[in-house]
Amino acid sequence: MKKATARIKTAIKNQEKILIYGDYDVDGVTASTLMEEALKLAGVKPENIEIMLPDRFIDGYGMSPKLIKAAEKFGANLVVTVDCGSRNHEIVNELNELKIDCIITDHHEVGETLPETIAVINPKRKDFKDENLKNLAGVGVAFKFAQALAKENLIQNGQEKWLLDLVLVGTICDSMPLTAENHILGFYGLKVLQKTRRPGLKELIKSARLKNLNSETIGFVIGPRLNAAGRLETANLSLNLLRADNNPTAAALAEKLETLNKKRKTEQNLALKEIEERPETTEPVIIETGKWHEGILGIVAGRLVEKYEKPAFVLSETENGIFKGSGRSFGDFNLAEALNFAKDSIIGGGGHAAAAGVKVEQKNLYRFRETINEYYKSLKLKDQKKYLKKSADLEVENLADLNLDFLNELKQLEPFGTGNEEPIFRLKNIQIAEIRKMGAEENHLRLDVRDKHGNTLKLVAFFAPENWLNLDYEAKIEPIIKLTENDFNGIKSPEAQILDIII
């Protein structure tokens, strides 16, 4: 960090040009925006900063060779990466040959060696021991860089806190554990987001008709809209939204993201429908292929995991008989290790334990499918579905206990996420008071339940399973729920989302 801040001081003094290179997901886009703002606050002139994001479909993840030409064209003296770069030795070497310095800020796993550059700021470095910072998102690492610039008196003390709304959004959307430093950054990030100064976030929240800002709405409403740009077109749309300095521009971009997100849902549902009409595999790992939009494959794989309770890969044919895809997993089945086992049957691939990307030649698809399932069987894993089951933290018989005051107390524990899970409740000794199917396809469910004291609570399930939709009033059920807040015409009341129903 000291080497990096010293290099920024030199860049400011000499009026050097800085190219920020990010990534196309929410973490990369928020980190790119944050890094630009931090450098501006530190004294770098706006005309001396440019941001470059890779194209998901052409460049893939990491530092693209196109970065070299872009840096030369801009006349960059320094490249600063966010959310990538720790394994891009060749690109860094090319920059070195052109006398263009590089600072890498990243949070992904490192290799045996680090690129030879000014600085590699990454909490996954083997020589870095602070466990509190190990799980920072890419945007979290960028924020630590901003804090270091503030410590060097380059940023006015306290101004960096206004960057925390970006940190919160990127951390949640990158599924990082909300423990240790991430929980502190998230706690204050939520306060900043509720008072955000960014026209882009304000307009995005407005276009999505969001009334409550919490980890769930960030992860399932804000995140998908920001991600839709990189999935279907270009992540620059989301970047421009976050960087927008006026409401009309931001509103137009937010509307564009809303449209793209609807298109993403349509593409996703068509792919899911096609897969669900096929015979269900008896193998432990689902591997489906077709001709679908590349940007939705990871989401579809995630949905297959939810529906069939098995790890899943979804691959789409691109060009020349090449299939690209994404995998999603859970429990003890590590996708990165599985792809390493199958390395002889794939062109390339990698990622994390729970999410990974892969590229396979058509002639090797059968071999890939066989090898992945062979690896799964060799592990002799037991009782993996337990990792997908929601177990209650508390049993509730009196629904009056789940009131607005209690809901407000729970909010003090936010933001929720991995490592700081939202409390789950099991309702006992209740009766069904009303059953209502919702949505154009009647695939959502509303249940009103009543306890023995006459207290009621509204429960909602989206994309409910068939057996839930077919419940009758006499059914003896014990719903597993999490508490949510209903805000109708300014009147707030507790309701609940159904996670499971014990029948």
Image (cartoon, rainbow, N blue to C red):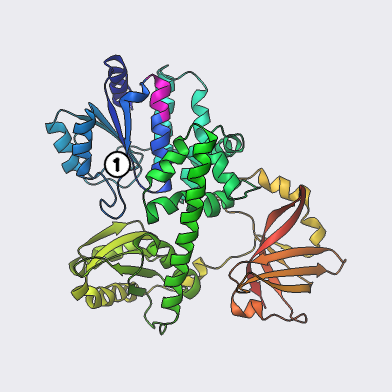
Q: Magenta region: which residues?
A: 37-43
Looking at the rendered structure, the kind of residue marked 1 is Lys
Q: Is residue 240 above or below residue 347?
A: above
Evaluate whether residue 134 shows in this view.
no
Question: Which residue sits at x=23%, y=40%?
Answer: 67
Question: Which residue sits at x=59%, y=75%?
Answer: 465
Residue 154: within the magenta? no
Local secondary structure at mark 1? loop
The quarter holding residue 154 reads top left
Q: Nearer the viewer, residue 490 or 263?
A: 263
Q: Is residue 119 left or right of 395 when viewed as pictured?
A: left
Q: Is residue 18 left or right of 500 when viewed as pictured?
A: left
| Residue for badge 1 | 126
The quarter holding residue 470 reads bottom right
Q: Nearer the viewer, residue 430 or 48?
A: 48
Q: At which x and y percent is residue 6? A: 30, 20
Instruction: Give the position of the C terminus as an image quadrant.
Output: bottom right
Question: Which residue sits at x=55%, y=49%?
Answer: 218
